[in-house]
């Protein structure tokens, strides 16, 4: 059923962002979304829809560390997807080195193969990697859904601003 599938993109639900001992822990808000994200993953799997994981995976000397403290170094505990949300067999995990899941990754090719009618985006941080990935989805004319209870940020004000921007500017369906 080409074009009848939804895709769920799980953004950076990694130890360094979601675990209290992570290098850039996003706070309890990030912990609270884990069961909601897990539930959504289950719904997508049960419906036969696709789940794709984005995973920050930086080199030791990544230039992003000029902007943020060292985090999610490729192969480290910090860059691993949290235990509660481990990918299922055949679910792509796309390593990325910048905010958008499209920057120098295979995400565009994978989505072109799936041809989803709708892309749902969940994870952290709302105002950075989630919003930048959503912007690039909209720039490619995908219909986008962001469940507000399944995204979190270390800065609540920026979280609210990002939700508002995605809804008003990118015209995502915020649920």
Image: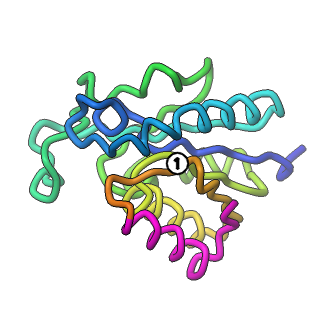
Instruction: List the single residue furthest toward the bottom.
Output: 169
Q: Is residue 102 magenta?
A: no
Q: What is the magenta segment's predominant secondary structure?
A: helix
Above or below 137: residue 61? above
Residue 91 horizontal/vertical position (percent) = 60, 28
Residue 124 horizontal/vertical position (percent) = 43, 48
For the point 28% across and 40% down, the residue is 25
For the point 51% across and 22% down, the residue is 84
Q: Identify the residue position indicated by label 1 in the image.
A: 107
In this rendered view, identify the residue nearer to me: 81 or 115: 81
Tell me the quarter of the image containing the N terminus. Answer: top right
Which residue range is magenta in the image? 157-175
Crowd around label 1: few <14 · some 14–19 · many ≥20 (10 Å) = many
For the point 32% across and 39% down, the residue is 17
Above or below 111: residue 49? above
Tell me the quarter of the image containing the C terminus. Answer: bottom right
Q: Number of labelled discs?
A: 1
Q: Is residue 160 magenta?
A: yes
Above or below 15: residue 158? below
């Amino acid at each position: 059923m080409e074009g009848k599938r939804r895709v769920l993109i799980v953004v950076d639900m990694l130890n360094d962002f979601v675990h209290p001992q992570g290098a850039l822990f996003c706070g309890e808000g990030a912990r609270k979304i884990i069961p909601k994200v897990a539930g959504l993953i289950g719904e997508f799997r049960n419906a036969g829809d696709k789940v794709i994981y984005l995973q920050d995976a930086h080199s030791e000397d990544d230039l992003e560390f000029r902007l943020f403290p060292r985090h999610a170094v490729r192969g480290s505990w910090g860059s691993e997807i949290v235990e509660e949300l481990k990918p299922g067999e055949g679910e792509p995990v796309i390593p990325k080195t910048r905010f958008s899941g499209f920057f120098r990754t295979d995400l565009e090719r994978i989505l072109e193969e799936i041809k989803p009618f709708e892309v749902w985006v969940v994870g952290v941080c709302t105002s950075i990697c989630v919003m930048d990935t959503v912007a690039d989805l909209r720039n490619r004319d995908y219909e986008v859904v962001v469940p507000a209870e399944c995204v979190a940020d270390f800065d609540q004000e920026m979280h609210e601003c990002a939700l508002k921007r995605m809804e008003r500017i990118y015209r995502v369906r915020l649920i």
